[in-house]
Amino acid sequence: MYKFSGAIAHVSFCPECLINDKELACLVKDYVSKNRNCSASEVAIEFNIPLARVRSFLKADFIGIKGENHGFLLCEECEKPINWGKHCHPCHHKFELAVKAQQVKK
């Protein structure tokens, strides 16, 4: 087993599954870029994949959805709805400032 820790997820894949997952991620990214107002549900239906897989692409900041997500993806810090990544903009900014403060202390 290989550990893939790139933009998609921190998951163990065999080499063949890793290639398949990367191909799927690229297809999903291409679909989302051509259908900018698509929902996560539409992506799941289009590719016949579970919503959890779409959520993992969103959390990895590999794709983003537009408009209201109705709580499909929440900021890991404050639990506000977000459209991609793990944190909303204010929480992300707060973490960036904390990291910079730590670097200054060193």
Image: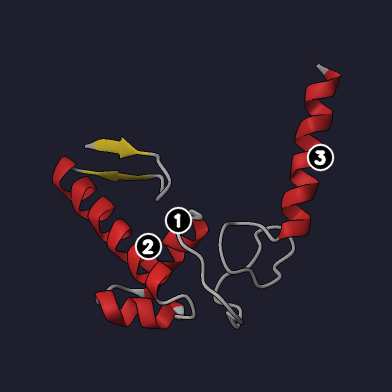
Label disc, if present, on residue 97 of the rendered structure? 3
Q: Secondary structure at mark 3?
A: helix
- Residue drawn 17% across the image and 41% down it: 15
From the image, tell me which residue sits under label 1: 62
Q: Is residue 94 above or below residue 84?
A: above
Do labels 2 and 1 touch, CB within 8 Å? yes
Q: CA distance from mark 2 to mark 3?
A: 30 Å
Amino acid on which disc 1 is placed: Phe
Image-based side of 94 in relation to 66, left or right: right
Answer left or right for 49 relative to 78: left
Task: Please give left or right for residue 34 compared with residue 19 in the image.
Answer: right
Amino acid of disc 3: Leu
Residue in the picture at 75% in, 34% down: 99
First in residue order: circle 2 vs circle 1:
2
Q: Nearer the viewer, residue 55 or 62?
A: 62
The residue pinned by badge 2 equals 29
Residue 51 image offset from top left, x and y in percent: 39, 74
Q: Going by the picture, which residue comes out furthest to the front?
A: 34
Q: Earlier in the sequence, mark 2 or mark 3?
A: 2
Quadrant the C terminus occupies: top right
Which residue is at the front of the view, 33 or 82?
Answer: 33
- Asked which quadrant contains residue 67, the reply is bottom right
Helix, strand, or loop for circle 2? helix
